[in-house]
Amino acid sequence: MRWQLPLFAVLVRGPSMVPTLRAGDALIVRRGGRVRPGDVVVAEFRSRPGLLVVKRAAAERDGGWWLLGDNTFVQDDSRAHGVADVIGRVIFRYYPRPFRLR
């Protein structure tokens, strides 16, 4: 078993979470923990292993989470890739302007 820090940083790429998040935003993520619908999370689609995504948790399905992006014009989320396994919940954005995500 490999030890991992409870917090880690990620960088947003792409427009799927606009207007909440934009490409270049730097985020702090809490690994594990309770996820609720509406939380912004870092996850991995089962159909795309190895690719981390930042999306909004919509509902639990098939032992995973159905994720949606906030940008209605981009459908690179569970509508295209199915359920995902959540790695952690985004706590706050620290760059460019810090703010707490709910």
Image (spheres, helix red, strand yellow):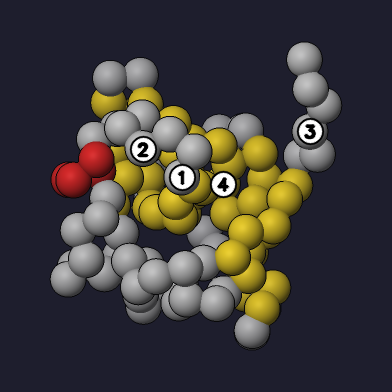
Amino acid type of the residue that numbered disc 4 sits on in the rendered structure: Arg
Q: Residue at x 72, y 50 (%)?
A: 8
Disc 4 crowd, CA 10 A, few/some/many (<14, 14-19, 20+): many
Residue ID for mark 1: 51
Amino acid type of the residue that numbered disc 3 sits on in the rendered structure: Gln
Indicate left or right for 72 with 26 as reference.
Answer: left
Residue ID for mark 2: 48
Give the residue at the far bottom of this rendering. 97
Residue 101 x %, y %: 55, 64
Indicate left or right for 3 with 20 as reference.
Answer: right
Residue ID for mark 3: 4
Amino acid type of the residue that numbered disc 2 sits on in the rendered structure: Arg
Residue 89, disc: 4
Residue 88, disc: none
Amino acid type of the residue that numbered disc 1 sits on in the rendered structure: Leu
Disc with the residue nearer the chain's start (2 vs 3): 3
